[in-house]
Image: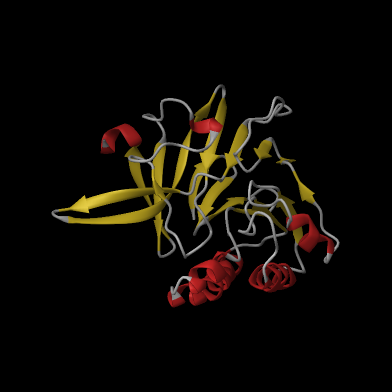
Amino acid sequence: MMKLLRNIYIIGLGLYLKDNRTLILGDLHLGLEENLINQGDFLSKKNFITIKKHLNYILSKTEIKTVIFNGDIKHEFGRINLTEWDYCLGLIDMLKDKEMILIKGNHDKMTSIIAKKRDLKVRDYYITNNVFVCHGDILFNNYYNSKTIIIGHEHPAISLKEGPKSELFKCFLLGKFKNKNLIVIPSFSFVNIGSDILKYEKLSPYLQQNLDNFKIYITENNEIYPFGKINDLR
């Protein structure tokens, strides 16, 4: 684990709020595998297996009471495919001894139908210990005196070069939104690494600002590597 702020640590591809034993995961996009398999990408069959393996690793390293899924739990917008039913319910059942908080992302228009099968609700946001957790696709007017905002949605990654070779890595971002700390978490999916923050237009309204002073933390094979500020890599 690596400490980002007081009580907030990076562990693998998740954030751990130590004081109340809470794990925050973002952008699983369960069901995307079915789309990719239909397009001939059979490597994506391993995605859910890898997600469960990585989650089990995190659970083995920490004492977790609550798991927050920070939006885009499933992938399809207008329907629920068979893979989404299977994987979403499978993941919920895997964590049945934990409190689970499901936050609505822009892909979660029908996630509440799945959640009802396990007596869960999908929320717009969640507040715990001065931390405001939301997906990041829309701005809120009130953060209820929270000091830190945690979002997903962006799937942040960064491309590093060594000679002619370039490789993309998932990363966390730490900066400011107005007078609050802002943490952007990577996608908890192994189908797609993410979007290079140095190249692509930002999706989240929280990131429509100068990001030069945002700090980068690369995560790879359960190791975390601080990489300075975005401006240092331009």
Q: Where's residue 75, x and y in %?
A: 61, 58
- Give the left or right position of residue 203, taking residue 224 as reference: right
Q: Where's residue 100, x and y in %?
A: 75, 58
Q: Where's residue 101, x and y in %?
A: 74, 53
Instruction: Give the quadrant of residue 81.
Output: bottom right
Indicate whether 13 appears above or below 199.
Answer: below
Indicate whether 3 appears above or below 64.
Answer: above
Quarter placement of the C terminus: top left
Q: Where's residue 89, x and y in %?
A: 73, 70
Residue extending furthest toward the left: 163
The answer to whether residue 57 is visible is no
Q: Which residue is drawn at 50% across and 28% down?
A: 176
The answer to whether residue 191 is visible is yes
Q: Residue at x 58, y 59 (%)?
A: 28
Residue extending furthest toward the top: 179
Residue extending furthest toward the right: 119
Indicate whether 136 appears above or below 158.
Answer: above
Indicate whether 153 appears above or below 116.
Answer: above
- Give the left or right position of residue 94, taking residue 159 as reference: right
Task: Name the foreground residue: 38 vs 3.
Answer: 38
The image's colour scheme reads secondary structure
Task: Name the foreground residue: 230 vs 121.
Answer: 121
Q: How many labels does the image show?
A: 0
Task: Name the foreground residue: 41 vs 150.
Answer: 41
Task: Name the foreground residue: 34 vs 124.
Answer: 34
Q: Which residue is drawn at 27% across and 35% down?
A: 232
